[in-house]
Structure formats: C-alpha cells, structure tokens
Image (spheres, coloured by chain):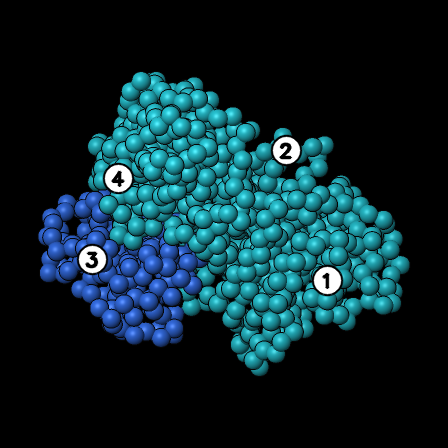
Amino acid sequence: MKKTLRTTNISRRKFIVGTAAAGGGLALGFKLPFIGSAEAATAPGTEVNAWVVVKPDSTCVVRIARSEMGQGTLTGLAQLVAEELECDWKKVATEHVFPGQNLARKRVWGDMATGGSRGIRGSQDYVRRGGAAARIMLVQAAADQWKVPAGELSVSNGVITHAASNRSTTYGKVAVAAAKLAPPDPKTIKLKDPKDWKIAGKPMKRLDTADKLNGSKLYAIDLKMPGMLNAAVMACPVHGGKLVSYDEAKVANMPGVRRVVRVNDGAVAVVADTWWRAKTALEALPIVWDEGANAAQSSATIAERLKEGLTANDAFADTQVGDALKVIAGAPKRVDAVYSTPFLSHATMEPMNCTAKVTADRVEVWTATQSAEGSLAAACEEAGLPLEKGEVHKLDLGGGFGRRGGTQDYTRQAVAIAKQFPGVPVKLIWSREEDQAHDFYRPISQCKMSAGLDESGKLVGMHIRVSGQSINAWLNPGAIKEGKDVRQLQGMWKEPGDAQFGYTVPNLQIEYAMRNTHVPVGPWRGVNTNQNGVYLECFMEEVARAAGKDSLEFRRELMSNHPKHLAVLNAAAEKGDWGKPLPAGVHRGIAQFMGYGSYSAATAEVSMGPDGKVKVHRMVLALNCGHAVNPDQIAAQVEGSVVYGLSAALYGEVTVEKGRMVELNFHNYRLLRLAEMPKVETVIVPSYDFWGGVGEPTICVVTPAVLNAIFAATGKPVRSLPLKNVKLV
Amino acid sequence: MAKLNINGKVRDVQVEAGTPLLWVIREQVGLTGTKYGCGVAQCGACSVHINGEVRRSCSVPVSAIKATDKIVTIEGLSRASSHPVQKAWAELDVPQCGYCQSGQIMAAAALLKKNPNPSDADIDAAMTNICRCGTYQRIRAGVHMAADMAKKA
C-alpha cells in the first residue's frame, strides 16, 4: 500500500482520469506501453482541478508539470500543493503531465521547463493556489451536502468536519461533487503564511525514492517496446562538420544490423536489433567526414582569441560607476590579474537517449527532458508535423544539469532516425564518448581584473573585463540586445533580485567582450555564476591581501548596501568558524556570490600534500533561498553542488584539438569520487520575503572558497582552472 | 550462446562472445536496473555481483562467464528492498536522480559482506563509483547505517 503511493504514476499503463465535469471517463492521457508495472493506484480518480485528482480512498494525486532530475522538485511541489490542500501527506501520490496534454488544455499547467532553478520558485504561487482551490471546492461540496455554511466546517488531513453537528466526511467521498462546482476566483484565495506550514517547509522524505533502490525505476534509456530497434549514432567529431559518405556494405552483415542511415547532414547512425550490436557496427563503419574549416581550431587558437578580447575596443560596459580606469591608474596601489576557466561537459550519468516512433500523422517520443515543450517542438519540427500531432512521454532524468534543456538535439536525432522506420519505435542511445564529444559545454572565458587601493587600503576602483563565449549567441541570439549580452556577466549585475554584484565600489566598470568559438555552449549547473564567481571572489581575495586586511572584514566593509549578501556571508563565516584556529597544515578560504535569486556563501578548509595534492576537508555553505520548502532536499542540493563544483575545480576541462573535443570518457574527464568528498555542512537562512532557487545557487561559491584556501596555504593566487594543471608547490 | 545464472535463474542467451555482460543483462535478459554509464569500468553504474564479488559488468565479456557463476543484479539483491543497504538508503534519502544508485548499492552490499564494520577509510577505498548528483556524503552515512542495521538484525 505504502509502496504504491510512493511510486510516481509514470509507471502506470494508462493515465485515465474520470472527470465528473466531462460526464464520465475522459482519457486525457497516453498509454505507456510495456513500461513498468501497473501496480500504482489504478482506481480511477476524480479531477477536482488541473493539479489535484482525488481517489475514493482520499489519496490525492498531485500533478507535476516540471521535470524531476534528482533535484527534488517533484517532492517540493507536492508539499506546496498538499499544504494548501490540507490532505493527508501519507496519501499523496504524484503524476507527470505531458506537453501535448498541456497544449490541448491551453497550458493549464503553465511552463513545463525546468532550468534556471525555477522549478519551485517559478510555479509556487499557482500550484499553491491550485491546492487551495481544490480544498475550497471539496469543503464546499461537503457544506452543500450537509446544507450548512462552508465557514462552519474545518478540514485536516483530508477529513472535513462540521463540529456543530458532529459530522465528518472525507475528500474521497465528496470529490465527485466538488469537481462539479465552479472553481473559486484565484484572486480571492488567501495562501497560508509560511509560519503556519505543516507539510511545506518540513524535511519530508522524497516521494520518488523507492524504485531507485531496487532497479525498477524506468529511465528513458531502459525503455522496451515490441519490435523496437536500437540506434547508435556518431556526429562529425569536429563541430559543424558534415557527413560525406559511409560504406554500409562493410557492416551490413554484422549481427543484428538492419540499416545504416544518414541523420540530417552531420551524423550517421547504425540501426540494429540491440544497441550493443548497433554500436559495434558503428565502430566498424568506414565514414568520410568533411570536417570543414573548424578542424583548424584548438585550445590554443581559442585562448588567443579570448586573450585578444581582454583588451579589445569592442566590449560593452554593463556597469559603469564613476571612472574606474582613471582612479585605478592614479591609485597608490593597484592589483592586476588575468583569470581563465575552460570548457566543461555536463556528463550526466544517463547518457543522452530518446525513443521515437513516427508515422505519417503522429510523432511520439519517450525522453528525459528539462524542457518537455521544447522536446515536443523539436520532435514535431523534425517529423514535419504540427504540435497537435505529437506527444512527449516524460521520464525522470538520470541527471540534467542544463544539458537536457531546450536544445533537444538528441530528441531531434531520434526522430530523424525513426522517421526512416515508419511505425517502428527506435531507441537512440549515445555512447559516453558521443556524449562528451557533442555537448553544449560550459562556455570558455578569461577575465582581466584590476583594482586600485588608496593609502589606507580602501578599494577605490575596480575594472572587470570578461572575454569569452556567449551562450545566447549559440542558443538564443534574440536575447542579445544591440550586441550586448549581459547574461555572460551573471552574478555581477547591478540590478537587485536575481544575480546582483554584492559590493559597493565607488568607481566600478564591468565589461564583456564576446568572443565566440565553433564549440557549442549552453547552460551548465550554475551557468555563468561559476566562472564569474571564481573571477570576482578570487580577485577580491587578492585585493584584500594587497590591502593587508582579513578576507572577511575586507568584504564586509564593501557590503553594507547589500544586507542579504552580507547576512549569508556572516552565516557562513560564523558556522565555518572563521578566524578560529585550524589544525596544522589546514587553511581556510571564504567566498560569497549571488545567482538564481538566492544568496550563497561558503568557507572551505583545505590542506595540501607535499606533492601539491589538494585535500578539501570541510565546507560550510550558507544559503538564503527566501523560502525553504524542504530543508533536507535543500541540503542534498548543496551537498551535490559541492561535488559538481569540486569536480570542475580539481579536474574539469574539455580541451580542443583539430577542432574536436579531446576528453571523451571518465579516465581523462575525471569526476570527484567519494574518497575526495569533504564534510559538507549546510546552513539555510531563509528570510521568507522572496522566492529564490536552490539547485544552482551554491555551486558558484564552492570553487572560489577552495581556491582562496589554497591561496592562504601557498601565498599565491590560483588564476586558472582546473587545479590538475596548476603547479601549487 | 551462453548459459547464465542470474538472480538464481538459469537463462540461455544468443549473443556474440565479446558482448559485455552489461548489455546481455540489459538487452537479452531484460533487466534494466543495471546501468550503462561509461563502458570502460570507470563509473561503476553497471556494478553486479559475480560469485559475491562486485564487478563492473560493462567490462566483463559474456564469454568470461561460466554457467556455474552466480550473477546477482540489483533486482536480485533482496526481496522487497529489504537489504540493509537499501533500507539505509531509503532512511537517508540517498538517491537524487538515482541513475548510479543500483551500482552504488551493489558496491556497498559487497563491501559489507566482506567487511561488516567498515571504517571511513574502508568506505573510501571500496566505494569508487561515480555519482554526478553528488550523493557521496549520504552514501558514506548510508554504509555506516546499513552496517549498524545488519548488526542489530
């Protein structure tokens, strides 16, 4: 029973909801043939509204429109709906909705995209109103039945009580009547004060753990369908290169091979009965590529281009306060530094994959996506069908981190292959090597920083010039206004609210020079706050030391106009024992930065072996995300951000040779392992006056806190990443 | 053609001799709890037990398996997720995306079988599977908790 409830209903064979309003069973949904078991609650429920389906036993099924990729949004959203619904948390189940359904119902579930740490903060208001509206309707149905004013009723754990007449009923009993009522005007709904929360704000267990423990959870890569074929794909290793030809005869007789197919103009796929046979044949397939001019590109040519941008005249200043250049030039003391950060791949544990089935008038895909509506658009466009003729069956992601967002290149490829096998489901899986070779990488950049100090060591001017590749130029050129791409300066914006620069400097100039490459780039957990956090916070450390001041005190003096930034910095410093003694050989660093509407700060305790090997012992991270919906899952995200951040800091880089990516598997794209995991302490300091993100904000302070601790250990700043390339001793 | 004893059931599979055990388990046998992550024995998402030892099945060709070898996958680890590692993982909400967790659980179960009371250093040495979500802190706590549970059981 419990297990049934805790199983998300994606594994149901059918998603059929009886709606009283529609006069009987309305099949909203979609068969998921042969996926999983039919064990999850199959008794029909009543849709009270778009967010809440109530079953006769008062089980409340909460509809989830955002994607779950491990970040816990599914549980958090269910908590917010359940809080307002006043249902029994032990009887809450969840159910994904699909973009075709959303489209058919005039986007009743709103935005389905799950990126930018917006899963909860971007939908909390309307999902809470959805839960509250359902509660109001259920209570009204009981009031109507008993012919008493609704105001005389109370509700708790899905049981409605009329104390005056000593009567009670359940959500399950009144759901059908409730569904027939007109919904309340959302504007009249008063949401609870977080002080009164009983389900939200609490460290509830995740709702989606059980099937991750016994192998029964179905990821997109696990799909099986009758007659399904499997495809292995290879795109030209040089980005932008074209497929010229391939010799199908050489592999046509290999076991299981059905056909070799062209995948648009830049890739080729072998389609076979199993994926292993498809991959084996693909490796044996002679392929001729036209690598094009990009084959001349390398990490060295790219670095040169970025370096040129550090001093070029075509940068634009997003922040210009006073006259920073003049003040720095005339300052009695100045500090100058150039920093750099590399391309990074996402390396989700589940490689890119998608199953597609295409007929003359229908395209269906089964995929792991952070942008289900983006998947629908990609699938329909590739199939040449209107949106109404497509559907995306969402499966939970084996990692996202920004890789599975709106681009949907893998979904497009799967459709391009499957349309050459009409009516046959084809599952495309990328090898790890293909996944590393064709990512949308974290953009490469360099940063030139200058600061001027007066005689007393006060910071009087700062000049920041970022030169690097633009995500928007690759993915969303329309977002660049008059050639000015402010996104690359994320975390150093002057506007409050989302990713604001946290210091007041009397003369300040922050610029960006766009220097694009042939390498595809995209959002990577934390996006540009990662690089900019390193640049700003490591340089601040250099400036503090040049001023002869304590790292924390130097920052505090510049932060009085940014009380929220300052508060998390203070929280991290306090819990991180700033200023207190450390064991011999252990050094401490600190950093603060802002992104995704939330404020983050960290301390790191680091030691170094005689060989310069860095060991991170302990990290304390403070986060003000406004509202804390599930403190335990926030801690999990913070812990995860440390791992993702440290992998990048210690080892992460994808380099370019002859136009192609070099690090193609985990032997040379090394990732953090358990033995390297520091003790992580999470300090959540929610101020409850805004809604910030959780999945991404803290990663940007991980690396600078560690680098600043290394600086404390060696007396030398680290200005380029990853650390594996830096000689520390 | 190979004869494989997987989770106590003997199965005949028609497959090329060089096929990795991982893909036989996933594609011929149809047990998909064992995951593909890297194909080169780096990440451990494909971890299974062969005669009680944890092995990375992506790098074990099916030809290396004897009919008498006992293979256990995540699906065969316990009935109803009752292994102490699975119970501890549930208690601590270890998984995030969950994709690597079959392998993590198999690695942890193999560790505890050999060493019922592992130190942090033992856990460091044995638990080398990659988790990209970064659940290592909870994995460590989970191994200790599972060890305690097994002692009390």
Chain bearing mark 2? A
Please give the residue where the numbered disc 4 appears in the rendered image. A40
Task: Write down the colour of chain A.
Answer: cyan
Chain bearing mark 3? B
Q: Residue at x 34, y 69 (%)?
A: B144
Q: Is residue B17 visible?
A: yes
Disc 3 marks a residue whose amino acid type is Ser
Label 3 and label 4: CA atoms lie apart by 21 Å
Residue found at the very far front of the displayed protein: A164
Kindly identify which numbered label has been placed on residue B78: 3
Callouts 3 and 4 on one subunit: no
Task: Write down the colour of chain B.
Answer: blue
Q: Is residue A577 above or below residue A326?
A: below
The mark closer to the camera, 3 or 1, is 1
Please give the residue where the numbered disc 1 appears in the rendered image. A556
Q: Residue B100 appears in which quarter of the rendering?
A: bottom left
The mark closer to the camera, 4 or 2, is 4
Q: Using residue A461 as the reference point, say whether residue A158 is left or right of it.
A: left
Looking at the image, tell me whether mark 1 or mark 4 is earlier in sequence order: 4
Nearest to the observer: residue A300 or residue A516: A516
Looking at the image, tell me whether mark 4 or mark 2 is earlier in sequence order: 4
Disc 2 marks a residue whose amino acid type is Ala
The mark closer to the camera, 3 or 2, is 3
Please give the residue where the numbered disc 2 appears in the rendered image. A479
Label 2 and label 1: CA atoms lie apart by 35 Å
The mark closer to the camera, 2 or 1, is 1
Chain bearing mark 1? A
Q: Position of residue A451 (x, y in %)?
A: 79, 59
Q: Residue at x 24, y 55 (%)?
A: B81
The mark closer to the camera, 3 or 4, is 4
Callouts 1 and 4 on one subunit: yes
Disc 1 marks a residue whose amino acid type is Arg
